[in-house]
């Protein structure tokens, strides 16, 4: 029996049981049948969640681009690999075949080599959603360089933090980007960042918006002439299974972002296997994930997962509202998209618009709809199901994380019956469990707790770049012997999981994972600010928005609060990016604290969420009087 493609519910249960009983055998069969290896592994799995250390397919040798490109050109070289839909609806779409992808990745890889990039070097990719972004990522993988893609909406200071943390030698960027009606000057953001990054030796620039930019002598170069001169053949670097493939940063509850390290073989197998099953991809399908490659969703489900399966994957440069709110549906119709994967925040925003934006388009090609990044509320789920899927395309509500590398809990379409708001059942190979606050596993169904995973899976991140101790503390210490996701979940009577949200100080805003601590650090740099606390509160479209409680050093210093609010959001934009701006800022006389001086965010979360009925016991606070003051002045 092939475990790779699950076609009915009985088979799902059988395969899941096997994956729990004999996990090594389960993954080994998949690895054997569906990938090309330069050398077979010596050992399928070794692991210890206490150290923590996890190794899959040790001893195996491979290159992921041989699996994503080379092997397909032998059988389907003329098939479209990447279908690029530009920001401007009047510009033609670009069909990049597997043959062309092979040539372009090799040329790019040869350019990287000519600039001295070698196996193990870190390369930062700061590009908009243009084909060169996917090609740069694959070119790094071709030569064994570790890519670190930074979402091109991050500010120069956020970019600098990430470049320095992993000591990148090179940055790949563009002169600028198009986003709807706007153009963004990316190169100057990179220039600002690099004032602070002496380790970067070279910058390669893709021409996108034809703007005139400053080129720093000896460091900056347009990439086009280099690509043109480069050979279309580049021997792949042969990698060990556990060699790092990429670093991708995610925010945490505290301090600097965490550079999650994903390794080669396990990540490849896991992203490919989950892509095939969760989207039920068939040979001539056109698949579209609307995420940005700057996030894990784009890594796993625009680039690696689809390409490892020889799929056609759409890359969209623009935004859902340009030139109008029918753009997504226009693209679905134009390219006859079969699988469509997006985020609840986009669904909620489009659901507010006129239905004619949808009704004007033929969406009959759609077979599967996906949702990712945050809990999807019931209303949005039904709107998606009724209007986009016409109640005939199952919705896969996929739960996973940057850290997990691929989808963990999700229905398999046409296999698992779906229930709105439930991510439903674990994929084969995944053993979730719920833990209570005392650290005990909660047995039975109709329970809620903290979502942990009991057993390793091939796609999991292996460490945090340069800080294994933080990896251990963040994910393996709250519940020793288990991976802790940071999410809460409930399990219903039939064993379906419903993710209820973060239980730590990370807030998911429009599907973006934002740690509150780095935002507070940014605000506290404002000279007028004494202290601040950021919490999330429910928001109609974004899912959550940010509420800042800010104490000023001096009140009545003559400044208008409105100006201060703008300045605070400006500082956040500079330090992190516009995605982290606060929706509400309340100036307070103090922040509620415990006797040991810790801010009681639980109370602030309730006030921000207008849920003041049950604030819990406030009598043990150091300064209970500020609570009423904050409530009275709530925005
Ligand atoms: O809280 C969960 C939420 O997004 C977090 C992971 O964010 P990130 O690492 O940025 O990856 C997002 C894309 C995989 C999770 O800890 N989340 C993700 N998917 C869902 C979700 N919450 C509820 N339902 C989901 N389907």
Image (cartoon, rainbow, N blue to C red):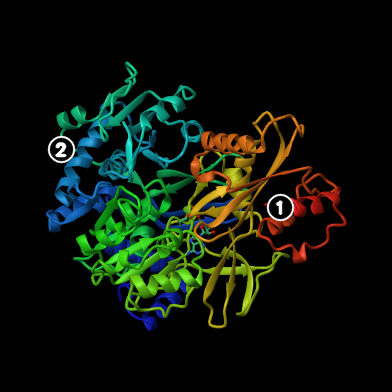
* Neighbour tally class for label 2: few under 14, some 14-19, many 20 plus, Cα within 10 Å: some
> Relative to residue 361, is residue 199 drawn left or right?
right
Of 281 and 471, nearer the camera is: 281
> Can you say whether 194 is above or below 250 in the image?
above
Q: Which mark is residue 634?
A: 1
Q: Is residue 423 visible?
A: no
Q: Secondary structure at mark 1?
A: loop
Q: Residue furthest top?
A: 217
Residue at the image point whose x is 38% and y is 53% from the top? 291
- Residue 149 on image: x %, y %: 40, 41
* Neighbour tally class for label 1: few under 14, some 14-19, many 20 plus, Cα within 10 Å: some
> Can you say whether 356 is above or below 307 in the image?
below
Of 37 and 193, nearer the camera is: 193
Residue at the image point whose x is 48% and y is 71% from the top? 379
- Residue 127 on image: x %, y %: 34, 39
- Residue 542 on image: x %, y %: 51, 56
The residue carrying mark 2 is: 232
């Amino acid at each position: 029996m092939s475990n790779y493609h699950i076609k009915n519910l009985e088979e799902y249960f059988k395969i899941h049981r096997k994956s729990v009983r004999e996990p090594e055998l389960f993954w080994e069969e998949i690895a054997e049948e569906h990938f090309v290896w330069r050398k077979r592994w010596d050992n399928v799995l070794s692991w210890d969640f206490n150290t923590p250390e996890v190794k899959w397919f040790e001893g195996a040798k491979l290159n992921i681009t041989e699996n994503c490109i080379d092997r397909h050109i032998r059988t389907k070289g003329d098939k479209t690999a990447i279908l690029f839909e530009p920001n401007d609806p009047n510009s033609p779409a670009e069909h990049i075949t597997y043959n062309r992808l092979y040539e372009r990745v090799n040329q790019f890889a040869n350019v990287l080599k000519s600039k001295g990039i070698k196996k193990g070097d870190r390369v930062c990719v700061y590009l908009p959603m243009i084909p060169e972004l996917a090609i740069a990522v694959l070119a790094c993988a071709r030569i064994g360089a570790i890519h670190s893609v930074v979402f091109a909406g991050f500010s120069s200071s956020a970019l600098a933090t990430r470049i320095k943390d992993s000591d990148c030698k090179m940055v790949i960027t563009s002169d600028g980007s198009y986003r709807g009606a706007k153009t963004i000057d990316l190169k100057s953001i990179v220039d600002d960042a690099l004032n602070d990054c002496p380790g970067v030796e070279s910058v390669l620039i893709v021409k996108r918006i034809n703007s005139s930019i400053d080129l720093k002598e000896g460091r900056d170069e347009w990439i086009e002439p280099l690509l043109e001169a480069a050979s279309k053949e580049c021997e792949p670097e042969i990698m060990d299974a556990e060699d790092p493939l990429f670093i991708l940063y995610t925010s945490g509850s505290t301090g600097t972002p965490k550079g999650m390290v994903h390794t080669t073989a396990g990540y490849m197998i896991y992203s490919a296997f989950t892509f095939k099953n969760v989207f039920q991809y068939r040979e001539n399908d056109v698949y579209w994930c609307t995420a940005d490659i700057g996030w894990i969703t784009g890594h796993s489900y625009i680039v690696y997962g689809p390409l490892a399966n020889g799929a056609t994957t759409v890359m969209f440069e623009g935004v859902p509202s340009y030139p109008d709110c029918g753009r997504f549906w226009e693209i679905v119709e134009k390219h006859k998209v079969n699988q469509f994967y997006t985020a609840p925040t986009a669904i909620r925003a489009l659901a507010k618009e006129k239905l004619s934006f949808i009704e004007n388009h033929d969406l009959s090609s759609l077979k599967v709809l996906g949702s990712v990044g945050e809990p999807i509320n019931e209303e949005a789920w039904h709107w998606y199901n009724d209007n986009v899927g016409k109640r005939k395309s199952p919705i896969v509500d996929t739960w996973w994380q940057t850290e997990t590398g691929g989808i963990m809990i999700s229905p398999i379409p046409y296999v698992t019956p779906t229930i709105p708001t439930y991510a439903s059942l674990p994929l084969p190979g995944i053993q979730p469990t719920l833990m209570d606050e005392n650290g005990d596993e909660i047995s039975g169904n109709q329970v809620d707790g903290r979502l942990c995973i009991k057993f390793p899976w091939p796609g999991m991140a292996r460490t945090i770049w340069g800080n294994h101790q933080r990896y251990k503390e963040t994910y393996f210490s709250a519940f020793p012997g288990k991976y802790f996701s940071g999410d809460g979940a409930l399990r219903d009577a039939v064993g379906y999981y419903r993710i209820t949200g973060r239980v730590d100080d990370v807030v998911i805003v429009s599907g973006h994972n934002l740690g509150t601590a780095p935002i507070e650090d940014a605000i506290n740099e404002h000279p007028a600010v004494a202290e601040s606390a950021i919490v999330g509160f429910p928001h109609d479209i974004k899912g959550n928005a940010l509420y800042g409680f800010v104490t000023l050093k001096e009140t009545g210093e003559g400044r208008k609060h409105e100006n201060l609010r703008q300045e605070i959001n400006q500082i956040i934009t500079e330090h992190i990016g516009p995605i982290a701006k606060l929706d509400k800022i309340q100036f307070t006389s103090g922040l509620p604290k415990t006797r040991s001086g810790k801010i009681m965010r639980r109370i602030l979360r309730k006030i921000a969420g207008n849920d003041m009925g049950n604030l819990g016991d406030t009598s043990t606070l150091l300064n209970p009087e500020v609570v009423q003051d904050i409530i009275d002045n709530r925005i």
